[in-house]
Image (spheres, rainbow, N blue to C red):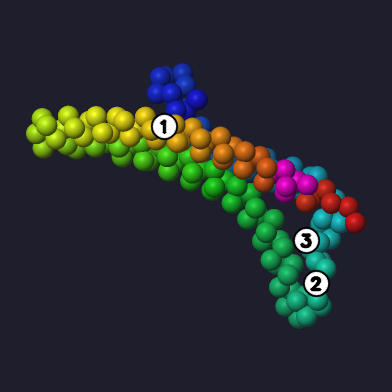
Amino acid sequence: MGLIPIFPFGANVSGNIAFTMVLALSAFVVVSVAGTKHYWKEIYWPDTPLFLKFPIPIMPFVEIFGVFTKPFSLMIRLFANIMAGHTIILGLTCLIFVTVSLGVVVHSGMTVFSVLLTVFMNFIELLVACIQAYIFTMLAAVYIGQARVRH
């Protein structure tokens, strides 16, 4: 709906970092609540050789760091991909206004080129939005599934 530039539907929701942060935090909460005791055992005391746990607990730090980086990567991936498409479309639209002082022929040629490329990029951005929604959902489901693992 953020691709339609008319008022009720013109909001770019998933290109807003606050919205993607709420989605990532909700995935983090679900993973944290749904985690079984085996999942949390693997986080705090992973099944690795003892020299990775003593004298410096390297693996528990890595696993705890992973608990926080998974939702952060979900947030940044969704935000950056959606925002990149909007930035490209904005740049193509700006070409129309930048070429005004170059003459009528150049300006009209760049206007046609910019409009055609913007329409093409809108279709590409729609495809990317669907793919990113799918990837976000699947990765969140994988993280939740990993938290629900039983020994």
Is residue 16 visible in the rendered structure shown here?
A: no
The picture places residue 61, in percent across and down from the top left corner, at: 70, 67
Give the residue at mark 1.
122
Q: Quadrant of residue 140?
A: top right
Q: Residue at x 40, y 23 (%)?
A: 5
The picture places residue 35, in percent across and down from the top left corner, at: 81, 49
The label nearer to you, 3 versus 2, is: 2
Range of residues picked out in magenta:
140-145
The picture places residue 84, in percent across and down from the top left corner, at: 43, 43
The residue lying toward the viewer, choosing from 91 and 15, is: 91
Q: Quadrant of residue 93?
A: top left
Q: Residue at x 81, y 61 (%)?
A: 42
Give the residue at mark 3.
43
Side of 3 where 25 appears, left or right: right
Q: Secondary structure at mark 1?
A: helix
> Of helix, strand and loop, which mostly describes the magenta segment?
helix
**Residue 17 within the segment the image draws in magenta:** no
Q: Residue at x 60, y 47 (%)?
A: 74
Q: Secondary structure at mark 2?
A: loop
Side of 151 where 11 appears, left or right: left
Going from N to C along the chain, the mark reached first, 1 or 3, is 3
Is residue 127 visible in the rendered structure shown here?
A: yes
The picture places residue 131, in percent across and down from the top left corner, at: 57, 39
Extreme residue in the right direction: 151
Query: Label 2 crowding class (10 Å Cα cut-off): few <14, some 14-19, many 20+?
Result: few
> What is the distance, in whole Å, between disc 2 and disc 1 at their CAs?
48 Å
**Residue 141 within the segment the image draws in magenta:** yes
Going from N to C along the chain, the mark reached first, 2 or 1, is 2
Amino acid type, residue under disc 2 in the picture: Thr
> What is the distance, in whole Å, between disc 3 and disc 2 at their CAs?
11 Å
Amino acid type, residue under disc 3 in the picture: Ile
Tell me whether the residue at label 2 lies in contact with that at label 1, contact meaning CB atoms closer than 8 angstroms. no
